[in-house]
Image: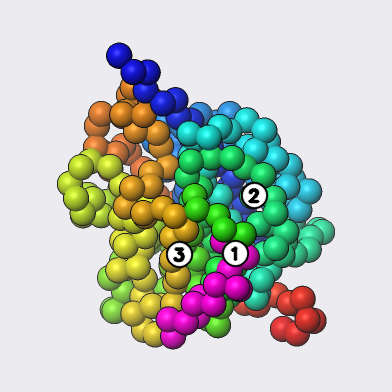
């Protein structure tokens, strides 16, 4: 009998900005809760945040620690493994804010790609919540795709699927509620938090297999993003050698003899409710390489 391929799941989660009560900690703490519910051990989750006393946080969100966390996964992950990189913060064209509240700077797209390139894995899922985050993959709100501008795939990567909360030329927004919002119970960022909620919504399981794929969670987020429906924002997706519907954050039973038998949306998920509802408005730009705003 052939031995099934071994698979481990890993994650780097970064809350990149200190602004309680904010969008960013709700996003990152929400995805942490989901990964735990999927059975991923804390030793495989590197969670960086300015809120070091919050559940699951391992270290402060300095640029050096982001690089350290990625290097840790690179050193420990294998060719059959799954890796999630999840980042929520302010952003600008080709850059993500990384601020602890007392110090900080910018992680540029090219540097991030160089760090992630050190990870050898079968599947890498990348989710970025930030204004102009589509610039990391060269995608614009009118549907234009410029491959040469895709820092995260321009090196010929064939094991990545990427979801950005905005296009190169649009801003992200915190939770916005109203009569036209199809998902008024959400919090966090309007584009990305729907992805998190998909894991506790049976309707998100489009194929009825009891599991939520990257593609199903992305579709649920897309369908329930009121800023997209209003035309204020345009989230983006890029598949680099992977089919979004075949990518999962956890290792499947066929890969490991795993214990995941119940439908994953039956796993309890405690939604994080903000103490103060953020005022509608863009999650604004940072200073770009050229020095503009």
- Residue 122 visible at all: yes
Residue 140 magenta: yes
Residue 276 magenta: no
- In this picture, which residue range is highlighted in magenta? 139-153
- The first of marks 3 and 2 along the sequence is 2
Q: Which residue is mark 2?
A: 117
Question: What is the crowding at mark 3: few (fewer than 14 residues within 10 Å), some, or many (at least 20)?
Answer: many
Q: Residue at x 38, y 78 (%)?
A: 228
Quadrant position of residue 243? bottom left
For this orientation, the residue located farthest to the top is 1
| 22 horizontally vs 251: left or right | right
- CA distance separating discs 3 and 2: 17 Å
Q: Which residue is mark 3?
A: 238
- Residue 273 visible at all: no
Q: Which residue is mark 1?
A: 154
Please say which color scheme the image uses.
rainbow
- CA distance separating discs 1 and 2: 11 Å
Residue 90 point in image, percent of width and height: 63, 68
Residue 164 point in image, percent of width and height: 50, 66
- CA distance separating discs 3 and 1: 12 Å
Closest to the camera, between mark 3 and mark 1, is 1
Residue 95 point in image, percent of width and height: 68, 68
**In-front residue for pair 245/10:** 245
Q: Is residue 78 above or below residue 155?
A: above
């Amino acid at each position: 009998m052939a031995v099934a391929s071994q698979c481990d799941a890993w994650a780097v989660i970064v809350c990149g900005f200190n602004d309680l009560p904010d969008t960013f900690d709700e996003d990152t703490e929400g995805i942490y809760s989901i990964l735990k519910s999927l059975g991923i051990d804390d030793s495989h989750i590197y969670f960086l945040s300015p809120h070091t006393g919050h559940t699951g946080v391992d270290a402060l969100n300095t640029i050096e620690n982001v690089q350290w966390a990625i290097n840790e996964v690179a050193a420990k992950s294998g060719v059959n493994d799954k890796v999630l990189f999840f980042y929520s913060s302010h952003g600008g064209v080709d850059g993500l804010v990384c601020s602890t509240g007392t110090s900080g700077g910018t992680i540029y797209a090219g540097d991030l790609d160089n760090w992630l390139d050190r990870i050898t894995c079968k599947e890498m899922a990348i989710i970025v919540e930030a204004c102009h985050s589509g610039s990391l993959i060269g995608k614009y709100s009118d549907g234009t795709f410029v491959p040469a501008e895709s820092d995260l795939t321009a090196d010929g990567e064939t094991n990545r699927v990427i979801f950005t909360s905005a296009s190169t030329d649009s801003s992200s927004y915190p939770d916005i509620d109203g009569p036209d919002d199809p998902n008024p119970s959400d919090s966090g960022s309007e584009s990305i938090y729907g992805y998190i909620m998909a894991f506790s919504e049976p309707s998100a399981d489009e194929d009825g297999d009891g599991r939520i794929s990257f593609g199903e969670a992305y579709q649920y987020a897309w369908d329930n993003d009121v800023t997209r429906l209003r035309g204020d924002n345009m989230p983006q997706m890029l598949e680099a050698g992977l089919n979004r519907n075949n990518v999962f954050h956890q290792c499947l039973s066929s890969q490991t003899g795993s214990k995941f038998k119940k439908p994953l949306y039956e796993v309890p998920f405690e939604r994080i409710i903000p103490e103060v509802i953020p005022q509608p408005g863009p999650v604004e730009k940072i200073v770009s390489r050229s020095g503009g705003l």
